[in-house]
Image (tube, rainbow, N blue to C red):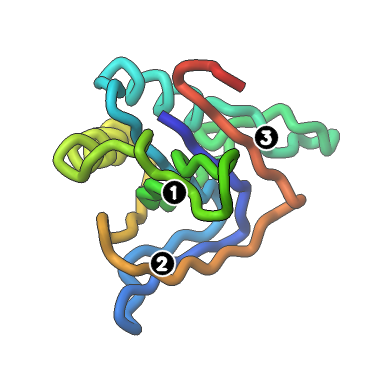
Amino acid sequence: MRAVVQKVSSSKVTVDGEIIGKIEKGLMVLLGVTHDDTSKDVDYMVDKVTNLRIFEDENEKMNLSLKDVGGEILAVSQFTLYGDARKGRRPSFSDAARPEVANPLYEEFVEKIKSQGINVGTGKFGAHMMVDLTNDGPVTILLESKREF
């Protein structure tokens, strides 16, 4: 499982001209799922995302987590995180999980974060989405449950 995590002052997702997910201060999480991901990968990612200390404390040091600042999450499924463009000019997406594998794990990710009392906005799995965000910092972190980078 891969995630691009961006600290945001606001973010929203629009599908067919309608805003379907919106947050204020928090994290924009683009989540990609691969074939062999399981609930163990979801648990790892939920723990990392919710406890990642990238918010400033009173001394302006990145020392606080999303939980510490009462932030929100906007979670958007993004299979292109498993795009491989090392050969040729057209990326291969063969490492991305099929929807019947990816969607349940994405939904599990969202539900496990919600169960911690965190407000979660979402995109629409498989839809063409327009994502707007104001990256605060800017701060962008790459996460990988298999710890390959």
Residue sitting at the far left: 100
Image location (x, y in percent) of residue 85: 56, 44
Query: From the viewer's perspective, is residue 51 above or below residue 121?
Result: above
Image location (x, y in percent) of residue 99: 20, 45
Mark yes or no: residue 116 visible: no
Look at 28% across and 65% down and name the residue there. 127
Cα gap from disc 3 to disc 2, whole angstroms? 23 Å
Label for residue 80? 1
Q: Amino acid at mark 3?
A: Ile
Q: Amino acid at mark 1?
A: Thr
Mark 2 crowdedness (10 Å alpha carbons): few <14, some 14-19, many ≥20? many
Precedes in sequence: disc 3 or disc 1: 3
Q: Nearer the viewer, residue 106 or 54?
A: 106
The answer to which image quadrant residue 111 occupies is top left
Image location (x, y in percent) of residue 117: 33, 37
Precedes in sequence: disc 1 or disc 2: 2
Q: Secondary structure at mark 1?
A: helix
Query: Would you say 68 lies left or right of 81 here?
Result: right
Foreground: disc 3 or disc 2 = 2
Question: What residue is shown with label 2?
Answer: 13
Label for residue 54? 3
Foreground: disc 1 or disc 2 = 1
Q: Secondary structure at mark 3?
A: loop
